[in-house]
Image: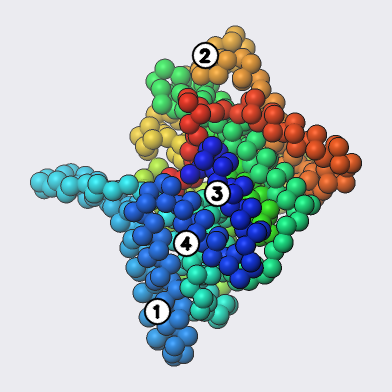
Amino acid sequence: MSFNSIDFLLFFPIAVFVYFVVPQRVKYVWLLVCSYYFYMCWNVKYVLLLLLSTVITYASGLLMAYRQDKAWRRLCLVSSFVINLAILIYFKYANFFITNINTVLGHAGMSANVPAVDVLLPVGISFYTFQALSYSADVYKGKTDPERNFVLYALYVSFFPQLVAGPIEKSEALISQFRESHKWDFDRAREGVLLMLWGYFLKMVVADRIAVYVDLCYSQFGDFGGWYLIVATVLFAFQVYGDFAGYTTIAMGAAWIMGYKLTDNFNAPYASKSIAEFWNRWHISLNRWFIDYVYIPLGGSRKGRLRKYINILVVFIVSGMWHGAGWSYIIWGVLNGMYQITGELLRPVRDWGVKVLDLDRESIGHKIYQVLATFVLFDFTLVFFRADSTRAALIILKSMFTVHNPGILFDGRLFEAGLDERNFVLMVLCIIVVLIADACKYNGIQIRGIIAKQAMWLRVLVIACSIVFILLFGMWGSGYNAANFIYFQF
């Protein structure tokens, strides 16, 4: 069941209505039932994996409380991580490892044909596994007390708004909210609806419209080379942003209607003036997870500059692998890690250049240059993120630099790659709206707060017009089949 499906539009109002009708003591039980039903709509049998991860991490917390000696607690933590990561690796990376083993042995002249594993990737497994493991790690560190109410803990792992694509929440932030009393609040519900509508706009109007152009160019890069692919790569940056930010914004709105506050996963990332700032604004909950549970345990920046750079690179390599089982994702991670390291190494050179050229870093022109440079650097890495393979990514990059056809930007041929002129112009206008909204957010201007201060008739009009606009211009697909969110595959 996807957020942009008819099933969810029927399921969610019922879930909310019953939630506010039942007594407080059973609210979290109802949410757990809703969450497991929500997940079972994808694949009934894979709900057992969700339950297994829940039981293992729940038990690890209790066992750590059973004995306080450090060796025992470390054993419980390591066992929780090993078992959960083994499950994740089997379902997500088994075929990747098998393929590479067969390739290496074949090049070595050894006959090998290890059969592939016939399994489907359980939706959201990377997200709920990392969320559950953060609980085990925080109990071990003493940051949170072991949760003894299994139903409450199971709800923490499976809370349906953020179950399959985040944000990845800390246990101390979410479980405490489940214990609170939440009554119906019209103002809060209105704010939640506005968040959901913005999320649907990002996903269905922006991302899914861009996907038509990008999917065609990247799947037929032999026919659509040069500037077709350059435009597609620029647009993909907004597609993946609209798709993922759209999901988490809908999740935030759905949770907030019921009184639960989730992490804002995106904070105007394309307004960033450096790669380091970008990664503090993009997929915030996952980046914090890697900092807390990978970067800091490796030593962070406490063991010298070289060790710091190695730790940064390790984090981004792991991040790349988390996103997908393929060398192209690892290259994507390495490139972003090298950007961070190179940025720090070249800082003295940049400072010297600014001083020699007498540049004003606070000028509008300099800030625009920084924003554009950051976007171009990140967008370059997205070729590896989007391409079907490393080989395809390299061919696409070669085409960008060797096929010279800038005329398509002016003679109308650009509208032959999936989107006609009307839809292409609408797409560009919607991207501009997104950039304006992010500029407001970057500067601390909350559009929802401005809407909330208006007269009742105007607030109703804004919501009504937003719904009509999404219904009219959203990409609904053939037979109203909901388009999957990109991050469901991770």
User: Tag 3's secondary structure?
Assistant: helix
User: Tag 4's secondary structure?
Assistant: helix
Residue 206: percent from the left, percent from the top? 61, 32
Disc 1 to disc 2, C-alpha distance: 58 Å
Disc 2 residue crowd, few under 14, some 14–19, many 20+, Cα 10 Å: few
**Type of the residue with mark 4:** Phe
User: Tag 2's secondary structure?
Assistant: helix
Name of the residue lying farthest toward the top: 411
Disc 4 to disc 3, C-alpha distance: 25 Å
Give the camera-side residue of 315 and 366: 315
Residue at the disc numbered 4: 130
Residue at the disc numbered 2: 416
The label on residue 76 is 1
User: Tag 1's secondary structure?
Assistant: helix
Marks 4 and 2: CB-CB under 8 Å? no
Give the camera-side residue of 297 and 235: 235
**Type of the residue with mark 1:** Cys
Left or right of 397? Residue 407 is: right
Residue 483: percent from the left, percent from the top? 49, 34
Residue 33: percent from the left, percent from the top? 50, 59
Q: Is residue 33 above or below residue 327?
A: below
Residue 475: percent from the left, percent from the top? 56, 28
Disc 3 to disc 2, C-alpha distance: 35 Å
Mark 4 or 3: the one toward you = 4
Residue at the disc numbered 3: 339
- Mark 3 or mark 1, which has the lower sequence index? 1
